[in-house]
Amino acid sequence: MSFNIFDIAGSGMTAQRVKMDTIASNIANINTTRQPDGAKGVYIKKDVAFSTIYEDNINRGFSNFSSNSPDAQFDPRTGNMLINANIALNNGMLTGGVRVDEIYEAENGVKTVYDPSHPDADEEGYVDLPNINLVEEMVGMISASRAYEANATVVENVKTMMQSAMNI
């Protein structure tokens, strides 16, 4: 059984946690019209971009089993391969899963509303606010939470299967 499943599920959990943190930041700043230093400037809604990680043997780079690898040494006299047992076969890199490419500002991140009583309203009574829809953010939060739970379930099920296999 491959241990890559833990890398894949773990990367999915990490990505979904980043998404939930970004959504939480959007919700927390739903009415923010000032920058942290107090200057005028509306908070811009943030979104997360993911990409898949897929590395096959061709794209992985040098193999640990090559004769010039620092992690493995080939003895041509005996034909034996000495492998450093303290390393991962994939050189510590994920060979599958998902990664967060970037956290970017949404294209339509600002909306203008008429509110002459707002302290940051202009001379005509309009104020720029973050274009954050609470319902959309909550749907995104639930979706990310369920994806996180699904990955955690995968890890738990694989762990149970490995324990059962060891008892055979």
Image (cartoon, rainbow, N blue to C red):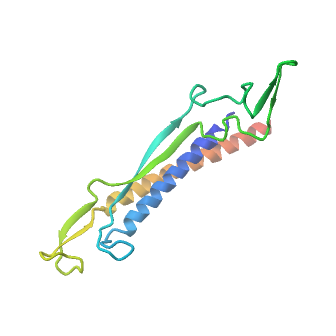
* Residue at left offset 33%, top offset 66%: 43
Task: Please name whichever residue, 97 or 144, is drawn nearer the observer in this view of the structure.
Answer: 97
Q: Position of residue 125 (x, y in %)?
A: 15, 76
Left or right: where does residue 101 sit relative to residue 84? left
Q: In the figure, 72 relative to 11: above or below?
A: above
Task: Please name whichever residue, 120 or 27, is drawn nearer the observer in this view of the structure.
Answer: 120
Task: Please name whichever residue, 55 or 160, is drawn nearer the observer in this view of the structure.
Answer: 55
Left or right: where does residue 60 sit relative to residue 140? right
Q: Position of residue 168 (x, y in %)?
A: 80, 35
* Residue at left offset 51%, top offset 55%: 17
* Residue at left offset 58%, top offset 41%: 8
Query: Which residue appears farthest toward the right when viewing the image?
Result: 78
Query: Which residue appears farthest toward the front when viewing the image?
Result: 68
Left or right: where does residue 125 sit relative to residue 58? left
Task: Please name whichever residue, 90 or 133, is drawn nearer the observer in this view of the structure.
Answer: 90
Q: Position of residue 152 (x, y in %)?
A: 58, 50
Q: In the figure, 20 relative to 57: above or below?
A: below
